[in-house]
Amino acid sequence: SQTIHQWPATLVQPVGSPLSLECTVEGTSNPNLYWYRQAAGRGLQLLFYSVGIGQISSEVPQNLSASRPQDRQFILSSKKLLLSDSGFYLCAWSPTGTAVGNGGANVLTFGAGSRLTVL
Amino acid sequence: SQQGEEDPQALSIQEGENATMNCSYKTSINNLQWYRQNSGRGLVHLILIRSNEREKHSGRLRVTLDTSKKSSSLLITASRAADTASYFCATAAGGFKTIFGAGTRLFVKA
C-alpha cells in the first residue's frame, strides 16, 4: 500500500532563516506531488505541484521554492523566511496518469502536515 | 485563488441530527471532491462526484452536484461526535490542479 511521510511535524524558525520541508511517498511510482499551505482556520492554497522529476509548477509567486530531486521526494524550501510564511504545510500525492480531462479524477492523499511558526 | 466557497463557515448541531454543507464554485469542472480534516491533521478524501453525475452516496454521506448552478452539497446523516471536523470541497477543472475552498467547520455536540 502507498504511504506518504512528511517532516518535520513542527518547526519554529526565526525570520530570515532558511527552510526545508520534506515529503516522500512509498509504494507507487511517478506520483503527482503537491505542496499546499493552510493559514489558521482557512482553506488550502496550492503552492507547487510536480508531475515528474525536475518538473515543478508554481502557482503563487512567493518566498518559497520546490524541488523534486527523486521520483518520490518533494522538498519545499526558502532561503529567508518571512513572518507571513507561518502556516500549516501539507504535502499530497495522486496517482500518475490521473490527469483530469483524460478520464482521471486526481484524488489526493495527504501527509500529516508540518506546522511552521516564524518568529 | 480559491475556486470553491463553502457555506456555512461553521455549523454546530446535536448528535443524531443531519448536517448539510454547501459549496459553490466559479468555473466549469470535471469533478468535485469532498475532504475532511480533523484539527491539526492532513485531509482525508471522502467522496468524488463527476460533472455528469447529480447525486452520489457513500455510507452516511450524500453528495449532490448542480452544474447549472455551479454548486454542490454534502449531507451527513445521523451525525456523531466523531464527525466533528472541517469539511472542504475541491474542484478539478483540468490537468493536475485541485483547488480547495475555505471549508466548513462542523461541531457535533454529544
Image (cartoon, coloured by chain):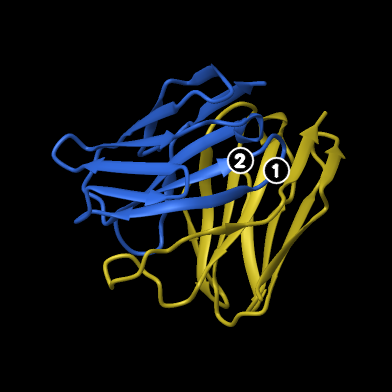
Q: Do the residues labelled 1 and 2 touch (CB within 8 Å)?
A: yes
| Label disc, if present, on residue B41 of the rendered structure | 1
Q: Nearer the viewer, residue A6 or B57?
A: B57
* Mark 1: few/some/many CA within 10 Å (<14, 14-19, 20+): some
Which chain, by letter, is blue? B
The 10 Å Cα crowd at callout 2, few under 14, some 14 to 19, many 20 or more, is some
Image hue for chain A: yellow
- Label 2 sits on a secondary structure element that is strand
Kind of residue at badge 2: Gln
Which quarter of the image is occupied by the C terminus of chain B? top right
Q: Residue at x 66, y 38 (%)?
A: B38
- Classify residue B30 as left or right of residue A25: left
Instruction: Residue B4 in the image: state x and y as whole percent.
Output: 36, 36
Residue of label 2 = B37
Query: Pointer 1 indicates a residue of which chain?
Result: B
Asked if residue B92 is positioned above or below residue A1 in the image, the reply reads: above
Percent across and percent down for residue A58 are 49, 55
Q: Is residue B23 above or below residue A57?
A: above
Give the Cα distance between marks 1 and 2: 6 Å
Quarter of the figure with residue B8 = top left
Residue B104 showing in the rendered view? yes
Q: Which amino acid does label 1 sit on?
A: Arg
Q: Do labels 1 and 2 share a chain?
A: yes
Residue drawn at x 60%, y 42% as measured from the top left: A37
Residue placed furthest toward the left: B68
Residue A62 appears in the figure:
no
Query: Residue at point 40% right, 72% down?
Result: A98
SS at circle 1: loop
